[in-house]
Amino acid sequence: MKTGIDLISFYSSNYYLDLKTLAAARGADYNKYAIGIGQEKMAIPPPDEDIITMAASAALPILQKIDPKDIELVLFATESGIDQSKAGGLFAHRLLGLPSRCRSVELKEACYSGTAALQMAMAVVQRTGKKALILASDVARYELGSPGEPTQGCGAVAMLVTRDPRILAVDLESGMYTEDVMDFWRPNYRDQALVDGKYSTRVYLNALAETWKQYQELSGRSFADLYRFCYHLPFTRMAEKAHERLAKTSGQEKLSAKALQEQLGDTLHYNRITGNSYAASLYVGLASLLDHATEDLSGKRIGLFSYGSGCAAEFFSGVIQDGYRPHLFAENQRKLLEGRTELTYQQYEDIYNLPFPTDGGKHTFAQYRTGPFRLAGVSEHKRLYEKIL
Ligand code: HMG
C-alpha cells in the first residue's frame, strides 16, 4: 500500500532583509553571501508572527480542501518551541478547527524532526487509514554579526499524510544515522543558536555518506535511479556541496555545472530567498522543486536527505505521483514571496532586539502584515492568537 505526502503547503513571513543590506551593515562582500553560501534574502518574522501562526497559515489551504474530521494526528516539528510543556500543535489545532478526536504532540531533533514526523505519521496512517497533519515550523536565529547570521530565516511547511497520496509516495527503505555531537545547539536559557559552523558542515556531509550507504544497500538503488535530490537546506551552497560529494561517493564523474543545476537547481529557489527554516527546510526544498519544475515529474523517483544537528539524519526516497500538479499550492506561494515587504537594516535590528514580554502583564502587539493568523498579544503568560481573515 502506498503512503506519503498527499498535500504540501509552504508559508513564510511577509518581511525580509536583503542580504545586500546585511553585507553593507557588516562590511562584508555581498558575493560571500550570494555565491559563497548561496543566499540572497532572509525572511524575518514580525513581532506578531511566530511558529504557531506560520504553521497554521501553511496548513489552512490544505484544510480548505479536505474534511478536517479525517485528521486523527497532528505532529508539530520544531526546534523553536514556544512552551516547555504544551505542544505547538494544540494552538494550531484550535486555530484550524480540527476535531477533538485527535492525537497531537511536538517533536524535536533540530532540523530532522520534520522527517521523524513524516515517518511516524506514515506508520499510523498505514495502520488506521486515517489522515495525519504535519506542521514543521521554525525561526532560525543566530547572534548579530556571527557567521551564522546571513543563514537566518523562517518558514513553515504543512503536509497531509495519507494512504494513496496525490503528491509523493514514500519508499520503505531509509538510511539512518545518529551520533551525539555538539555541532549546533541552543540551551534552554538562550534564544539564539550556538554553532561550530565549519564542524557542522563536516558532520552533515559525514551523515550523508553514512545514510546513503545504508539506503543503497537496503534499496539496491543507485545514484542514477534518483531523478532529483532534495537536501536539508541550512543555505543553498550546502546542498550543492552535499550533492557533489554524493555524486563522487557514488563513483560518478565530476558533476558539470549543468548537471548540478538540473539535479538540484529547482529545489533551491525558495530557500535562497527565505533562509533556513530548520525542521521545515527539506520540505521547503521539495515544495520548491514541485512548483518550479517545468517538466512533468510524474513517476519520477526523488532522493531526500534530512539532517538535524546534534545529530540525526536520514536518506530516503519517494515517487512523485501521476497528476500531482493540480494539487500544488504554487500560486499561493508565488504571491506570498513576490508580495513581501523589504526591511531596512534598522527595522531588522529593532525586530531582532524586541524583547518578548515576560512580566505576566497584558500586552497587545502592533499589527504587521501576516497570513490569516497572528499573535495578537500575551496576557498572564498566555499567548493570544487570532484569525484575521
Ligand atoms: P563563514 O565561516 O563566515 O564563511 O560562515 P566562510 O569564510 O567559510 O565562507 C563561506 C564560503 O564563501 C566559502 O566557500 C568561501 O570561500 C566563500 P567554501 O570554502 O565553503 O566553498 N567566500 C566567497 N565566495 C565568493 N565571493 C566572496 C567570498 N568570500 C568567501 N567574496 C558557516 C560559513 C557555514 C560556518 C556559517 O554560515 C555558519 O555558521 N552557519 C550556521 C551553521 C550551518 O548552517 N551549518 C550547516 C550544516 S549543520 C545544519 O545544516 C543544521 C542546521 O540547519 C541546524 C539544525 O539542524 O537545526 C544549521
Image (cartoon, rainbow, N blue to C red):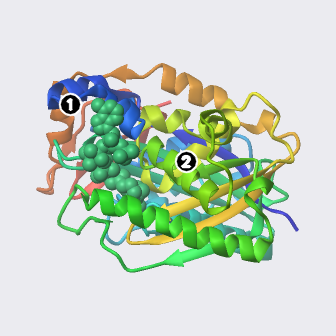
Q: Is residue 35 above or below residue 137?
A: above
Front residue (pair 256, 317): 256
Q: Amino acid at mark 2?
A: Val
- x, y (%) of residue 139? 36, 48
Amino acid on which the number 1 mark rests in the picture? Ala
**Tally of numbered tags:** 2
The residue sitting at 64% across, 52% down in the picture is 159
* Residue sticking out furthest to the front: 253
- Depth check: 78 or 360 in front? 78
For disc 2, does the CB lie below 8 Å from ligand 1? Answer: no
Camera-near label (2 vs 1) is 1
Name the spot of residue 307 as percent of width and height, x first.
49, 63
Q: Quadrant of the N terminus?
A: bottom right
Q: Position of residue 378 (x, y in %)?
A: 25, 49
Q: Is residue 262 left or right of residue 308?
A: right
* Residue hosting label 1: 28
Q: Residue at x 70, y 38 (%)?
A: 290
Q: Is residue 257 left or right of residue 372?
A: right
Which residue is painted at 51% across and 41% down in the image? Answer: 57
Q: In the image, which disc is placed on residue 48?
A: none
* Residue 377 seen in the current view: no
Left or right relative to 20: residue 63: right
Write the residue at 67% across / 50% down: 253
Is 134 or 92 nearer to us in this picture?
134
Q: Secondary structure at mark 1?
A: loop
Residue with the mark numbered 2: 157
Local crowd size for mark 1, using a 10 Å CA cut-off: few (<14), some (14–19), many (≥20) = few
Q: Is residue 57 above or below residue 301?
A: above
* Mark found first going from the N terminus, 2 or 1: 1
Q: Secondary structure at mark 2?
A: strand
